[in-house]
Image (tube, rainbow, N blue to C red):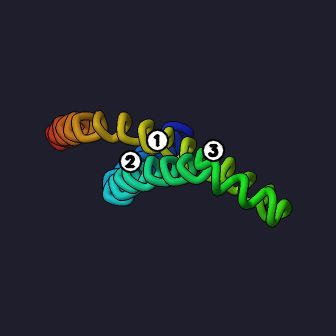
Amino acid sequence: MGKNEEKAGERTSLLETIDDLIYHMNDARLTFIIMIVSSFIIAPIAIIVALVFAIHPALIRLMLIREPVFGIIFAIYIVFTVIASLIWLYVGLREHRFLSRWNERFKKYLSLKERIDRELQKE
């Protein structure tokens, strides 16, 4: 096999790999949509509940006076919950922005691929 044939084979396999990756991304779109919806619903609820517990003065005073160790652990848990929820919300917003443009790009990709396939079949 010559160098040109090897390069053509590598190029074809690379294009097939890219095609497979693009189709896999399109199939995984539903999973990403579920993740986005959960981040838009669960993260704000977790933040609100954590802040209500953290801001409630009687609850904090009661925990710190009666069970100081539990109060400290609870405060750490609240901070961790808020940080994790903010990260989850940020990831959801980024994925939403990406997927909102994905459908358009995927349709454009399919039309270009079909056009290239037709041109290659003519030759």
Name the mark on residue 56. none
Contact check, label 3 and label 2, Cβ < 8 Å = no
Q: Amino acid at mark 1?
A: Arg
Task: Look at mark 2 in the image and give the residue it sits on.
Answer: 40
Q: Answer left or right for 72 relative to 79.
A: right
* Helix, strand or loop for disc 3: helix
How far is the residue under mark 3 from the one under mark 2?
15 Å
- Looking at the image, which residue is at 58% across and 53% down? 53
Q: Amino acid at mark 2?
A: Phe
Q: Is residue 6 visible?
A: yes
Please tell me how many numbered marks the rendered image carries.
Answer: 3
Name the mark on residue 83. 3
Q: Of residues 103 and 80, which is closer to you in this image?
A: 80
Give the label, 2 or 1, closer to the camera: 2
* Residue 14 horizontal/vertical position (percent): 47, 45
Q: Is residue 5 visible?
A: no
Contact check, label 2 and label 1, Cβ < 8 Å = no
- Looking at the image, which residue is at 17% across and 37% down? 111
Q: Of residues 51 and 46, which is closer to you in this image?
A: 51
